[in-house]
Image (cartoon, helix red, strand yellow):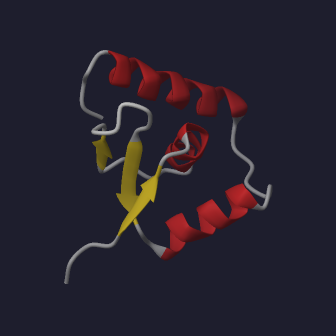
Amino acid sequence: MEKQLLKISDLNMASALLCEGLDIIGIDDRDPRRFFFFFDRTPKSEEIVKKYWNGLLRVDPKMMGSYRREILTRINQGGNL
């Protein structure tokens, strides 16, 4: 059975998913205007996304900012996540 992937282009959402203990599996940087982040699609990841869009997800703002900066640094350095 092939893994189902969650494709996210929202940097803040990707950071929030990292705060919740999920890992970025891959990144698609082929579009110069936007990056796509891939996570395992699980009931947990789908619930986090739902809470995020409904304004119900609560994460540590310092941790989220740290993950956001880490993602941006790695993107800017051309490194893998």
Please name the residue shown 80% across and 55% down the image: 55
**x and y percentages locating residue 80 in the rendered image:** 24, 31
Quadrant containing the C terminus in the rendered view:
top left
Residue drawn at x 36%, y 47% is: 24
Count of all numbered marks drawn on residues in the image: 0
Specify the quadrant that holds the N terminus: bottom left
12 versus 79 height, above or below: below
The residue positioned 40% from the left and 18% from the top of the image is 73
The residue furthest bottom is 1
8 versus 35 height, above or below: below
Residue placed furthest toward the left: 1
Instruction: Work out whether residue 75 or residue 23 is closer to the camera in this orientation and state it.
Output: 75
Q: Is residue 20 left or right of residue 57?
A: left
Q: Quadrant of residue 47?
A: bottom right
x 40%, y 46%: residue: 36
Outermost residue on the right side: it is: 55
Residue 71 in picture, x, y percent from top left: 43, 29
- Side of 48 where 76 appears, left or right: left
When asked about the image quadrant of residue 76, the answer is top left
Measured as percent of width and height from the top left, residue 32 is found at 36, 31
Residue 30, image x and y in percent?
Answer: 27, 39
